[in-house]
Amino acid sequence: MTVKEIFETMDYGPAPESAAEALAWLVDAGDSFGHFIDGAFTAPGAETFESRNPANGNVLALLSQGSAQDVDAAVKAARRAQPKWAALPGHARARYLYALARLVQKHSRLFAVLETLDNGKPIRESRDIDIPLVARHFYYHAGMAQLMEAELPGREPLGVCGQIIPWNFPLLMLAWKIAPALAMGNTVVLKPAEYTSLTALLFAQICQEAGLPKGVVNIVTGDGRTGEAIVSHPDIDKIAFTGSTEVGRRIREATAGSGKALTLELGGKSPYIVFDDADLDSAVEGLVDAIWFNQGQVCCAGSRLLVQEGIAERFYEKLKARMDGLRVGDPLDKCIDVGAIVDPVQLQTITRLVDDNAGEGEIHRAAGPLPENGCFYPPTLITGLHPASPLMQEEIFGPVLASTTFRTPAEAVALANNTRYGLAASVWTENVNLALDIAPKLVAGVVWVNGTNMFDAAAGFGGVRESGYGREGGWEGLSAYTKPAGKAKALNPIAPVPAPKKLEAEGLDRTAKFYIGGKQARPDGGYAQAVWSPKGKLLGHVGIANRKDVRNAVEAAHAAGGWARTTGHLRAQILYYIGENLSARAEEFAARIDAMTGGKQGAKEVEAAISRLFTYAAWADKYDGAAHGVPIRGVALAMKEPVGVIGALCPDEAPLLGLVSLMAPAIAMGNRVVLAASQPYPLAATDFYQVLETSDVPAGVVNILTGPHGDTAPALAAHMDVDAVWAFSPGLSAMVEKASTGNLKRTWACNDKATDWFAPEAEGRRFLEAATEIKNIWVPYGE
Ligand code: NAI
């Protein structure tokens, strides 16, 4: 380009970043890599595959396909290293994490160029966003290691963590996984995505430079088969996965009943809502970051544009003009806005999804030229789509924006939430009342007000619904890498008392019904079971719930959605009232428990249940969120929201206290519950209906079923309108976890470990955490 041309067009000339250092690093490594196991690189494996630069198709290196033996060697190394690593003072771990942060900064240019070569993302992004965020994550978690002993008493590491990450933010996802795991005293076996393993291998090298004890970080490369070997390895305590919802589901199934902890960060189809009073130019600029950042290959990309009708035409015009100015090209060029798609396979997926479905909409592609070779796709806008169109529903994972319009704020919320995902959302308006009215109504783990795609180690990231569960970052991210200290005992099943040989006359029918929607309801199937005392006395009958009864109870719980919007103060009052009414009938309940169990703990159990109700009445208005200071102009408000409808299999062994221990934290946080009462001792639950009826609990907030959990659990775990299942009865954890994959509901399975329901550990934060989801709402604040 001549100087004259530059002045005439005011266009940028190319400003390429040199690839020389990164290519030299690859040559030094011999252009082919083994794995990083037990502090050393292995020789390249028997099976290798190519890692290519998607911008030009050049082979960058040969990588090894990790076999089951490789994974096993890595797990063994991690296991050997873990006790010593965990036993280090937090300060010592903090120093290692600090050293890693410093080394990432020292080698930041090499990391950025290597990332861009391998993934195709613009160098501006890897240099200014990915790598600085990686360093920030290690700094932040160095702090967490330092503070662990003081701030997380009673928590200990999980052990060995298997971590599987995607290709869209290769090094950043590695940091999100490794930093908190190490900070809390775990060791890891991490598998990068097969398209993008190079920066993970460079990271392995800086682990050596930092003098990290061998075995603390192990990196095994390979495709999904290597991932499967990690998922199924019996000596791994936790799986942390980021990737597609489809693979996330498979991992949930594969780990069901194994006792492995699991967090899933999955796909999204995040709405980007523009109201008619928004600063339209800012909202257009925001879209460039929402959907054209990283070529749209971002799980929380603002890929569904919802524009208020009155401004839609004007907004689309501005947006198209901006799109036409976007420069697509060589990712190493510092003047490029949009780089290469990660791989020809992904390019094909994007192309096919758009070509098959764009017919019904109006399509606009950015006017700028595309490079002739390499994996490039033009920034694309498709307007006028029906909300049910696959382009509005499916994750495209490319630079494609699908759009429709809305009229009212209520319609915007309805459209925004019309998705099976729930990862993120952006709201654009100059009206603070409107923004803060809409934010709580959006079903998403993250909401950005007048912003988009902002991340920070201090603000937890993660989704709801089929976007997965667990949070990464912040205090909440740590709970995914720790567990309560101490060893749990095995849970012994309790069989119902069998009928005596000599039956007494039954007399009047005393079959207790179910409690559904605030009313007592007869069993749909008409079957009942007798409840005998160990002395052979018939104490009563209870109904046996079937699938239909479960459905009715879930429906009633759903209809009580208003409970989620009540104040903590009101919920506290109702919990105190339940406690008071139980207290008034304490003797009767104590006698009932003793009669069923043949024990003498009844009075103690009733007292403990009343105290527990008071505990959660106390918490109802005190389990507060937080305002995180993030290094971007704003604050992230971490708001605690109810999970929704929780199905709970109540423990058999403490018929009243167990039920109250699950019900109270759930309803204190605004959830509605469907409780399956203790199987052998159900009458404490059926007597409890009257306590609920006299305590102002709104209809549908608490629903109680009786009968074998083996009948109710499959229906609860598979129900698409149940958001979480807590399984505290024996023998059902695997089934519940397996059946939960339909809507990826949260599960809390006891895995046949006993809980002492009388102990202080059986109440408090652990339960409140399971009863809430954290939504991080980023709002502009300060200068
Ligand atoms: P993927 O979910 O297949 O891959 C993610 C990681 O999981 C990779 O490391 C892969 O090797 C591993 N993996 C694959 N199969 C596995 C298995 N059975 N067991 C254990 N690990 C396994 O994602 P993929 O195929 O790369 O991309 C497909 C689609 O997934 C994309 O088009 C996009 O829609 C979505 N995706 C979403 C991401 C997100 O962050 N939400 C990230 C990457 C992809």
Image: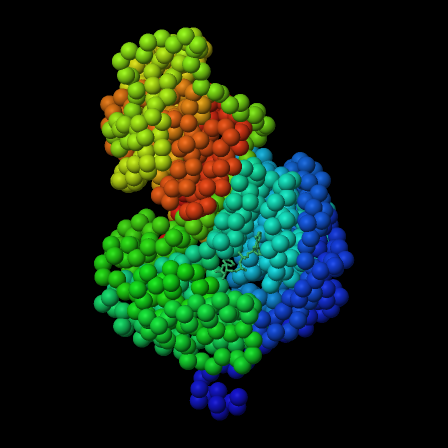
| Residue 518 falls in image quadrant | top left
Picture coordinates of residue 602, whole percent (x, y): 41, 13
Could you say which is closer to the camera, residue 219 or residue 428?
A: 219
Q: Can residue 400 be seen in this view?
A: yes
The image quadrant in which ligand 1 is located: bottom right
* Residue displayed at 44% across by 51% down: 467
Estimate the x, y position of residue 358 in percent, counting from the top left. Answer: 37, 71
Identify whether 491 is placed above or below 596.
below
238 to the left or right of 401: right
Residue lying at 38% horizontally and 68% vertically, measured from the top left: 357
Left of 300 or right of it: where is 645? left
Residue at the spot 52% in from the left edge and 66% down from the top edge: 346
99, above or below 552, in the image: below
Q: In which quarter of the image is residue 112?
A: bottom right
Q: Quadrant of residue 522?
A: top left
Residue 704 percent coordinates (x, y): 33, 28
User: Can residue 132 be seen by looking at this rendering?
Assistant: no
Could you tell me which residue is drawn at 38 percent across and 64 percent down? 391
Residue in front for this viewpoint, 742 or 565: 742
Q: Is residue 290 above or below residue 434?
A: below
